[in-house]
Amino acid sequence: MSIEQKITSLRDELREHNYKYYVLDEPSISDYEFDMKLKELQKLEVEHPEFHDPTSPSLRVGGMVTKNFETVPHEHRMYSLDNSYSKEDLEDWEKRIQRILGDVEVEFTCELKYDGASISLTYEDGQLVKAVTRGDGFQGDDVTNNIKTIKSVPLQLKGDYPPKFDIRGEIILTLEGFAKMNAERVEAGEDPYMNPRNTASGSLKLQDSALVAQRPLECLLYSIAGDNLGVVSQFEVLEKARSWGFKVPTVAKLCKSTEEVMQFADYWEVNRHDLPYETDGVVVKVNSIQHQDELGYTAKSPRWAMAYKFKAEQAITKLNKITYQVGRTGAITPVANLEPVLLAGTTVKRASLHNADQIAKLDVREGDTVFVEKGGEIIPKIVGVDFAKRDTDSKPTQYITHCPECETELIRKEGEAQHFCPNDIGCPPQITGRIQHFISRKAMDIEGLGGETVELLFKEGLIGNYADLYTLTKEQIMPLERMAEKSAENLVNGVQASKAIPFERVLFALGIRYVGETVAKKLAKAFKNIDALMAASQEQLVAVDEIGERIAQSVIKFFSEPVNQDIIDRLKSYGLQFSLSEEQLENQTELLKGQTFVVSGVFESISRNELKKMIEDNGGKVASSVSSKTSFLVAGDKMGPSKRTKAENLGVPIISEQEFLQKLEV
């Protein structure tokens, strides 16, 4: 056997042993035998570097140091899931699905929802080429070197895998591994980690991959994304991924009704504590990939998936003081400052009280003993008071009448839950909040500038609004606390680089009330540039898809204020993008303006998503279900019969893929 053959043989053998040990939990040789074979391979690879292989099992030990994790876009967006907390929630979700799909049989795949750090792995020709954290769903941090050290992540796949795809999963720490890590830390005189989830997440951003390799991390995979993947159902996705070498939990179940889904959820709510890792609920997905495509997505979540959360964990503690926070829109949020208490693996010191009505409803008072929950909420909330422990001299909470920051009298409009500070120009938290929103990742994404630095720049009088960022100089920034020459230079460069951010994100960054990412995109697309948008009437605004009167009034109010007009004039002069690019304009027409399309079935020359984009790029609107307002039903192969029947009954024209494409020919 030649040296190259010997190296190849050892690699194949070690890959198989890795798979049996870390994925199947069925080791076939001892740890000692494995280590001896690994050392033999490492020795041969050092002596013969000409046979280097980036997927070699010897590279699992780490040693690569990453000082700055590059932010990279996801080729396929990572959406978040809508949450449900009862059988009624799931039944309502199923009804919404049936309204869109029509009278078809819908199956569901149920999987456990693992509590870890989300990851997206990209494979090309069976090799791991990139690993990216979830980030904001649109882009995340490249942590490939660290992920390569996790033994349950295959570096080289086996079987009939697609040529290129992304696979999504959760990086977790087993409860046993977490306990062992903490025992070692305590023995070394260090503080133990608080919970497995945060520790797993923090591990991905360690600079030295050799340290990551020492942690007992695992990767549990649950979905794939890509084109022409050759799978027809979510359950098949799980089976295929398992056959390619991924660690995919085997507890998933195919259910034919929400009744069966609830049986699965009820079982695991009781038995989850027998699992080797933490789980906080069940993820329910429509099983058919075709149905998933038809259902599509909202701005934030897939319509075909739902997270059913297990009942919230609860703790009891004392409410020491109620304070009030001012948001960037002037909204006042009451906050309960608590006696620290351990809840779901983290120490909780603060909890949301939401608004004045919630305080009155619960009759929450300072000094009370309260019940705190951390269910589907990121921020814990108070859900009740132990009245038996209330002091006899306790007095009801009097909600504040003036802003805690600028002393302006608060207002509360009819129909709104929160009080507001109307001093949007002079209230410090509103000013810094708007600037922090402006620089955020989904908006201008200014590198080298964070929330603390914004507060510092404002405090020192260097900025009073986000337009002032573009006049900052290195010399102004360097004397500030924690600012060296390099960090000052990075900040100024980051601000200058943001001038290339496209119009729709600049519009979102302005912080117009009710104008989120999706609305900003629709407005940018409809009006093409900021001048047309600023001149638009309420009638013109509400004519845009999904823009109602409330949004239209907010947009008009924002642009009517002289201070905002001045800021926009300044931002224009600094070179920010206030119109769609030439490329965007070239790809858009008004050919389908005023027409509404429903797209259903499987298409030959283009994907369903590409077809929908073509409709929108040409001024049309895409709807999910057929109605009297539908202009055309674009029918592909395997279209649901109920959609066709409804279209025929309503007299909606049914056109083929080719007939649709002919509409765009000029």
Image (cartoon, rainbow, N blue to C red):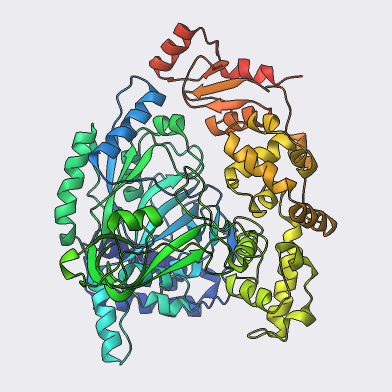
Residue 181: x and y, percent? 29, 79
Quadrant of the snapshot with the N terminus: bottom left
Residue 191 seen in render = yes
Picture residue at 44% right of the left edge, 70% below the top: 204
Pick the residue in front: 65 or 161.
Answer: 65
**Left or right: 550, with 321 as reference point:** right
Pick the residue in front: 473 or 357.
Answer: 357
Picture residue at 74% right of the left edge, 72% below the top: 492
Picture residue at 39% right of the left edge, 63% below the top: 398
Residue 279, image quadrant? bottom left
Instruction: Report the residue that reaches farthest toward the right.
Output: 573
Compared to residue 525, the image places residue 141 above or below, namely below
Picture residue at 43% right of the left edge, 36% below the top: 230
**Left or right: 537, with 28 as reference point:** right
Residue 245 seen in render = no
Residue 559: x and y, percent? 73, 46
Pick the residue in front: 493 or 474.
Answer: 474
**Left or right: 382, with 550 as reference point:** left
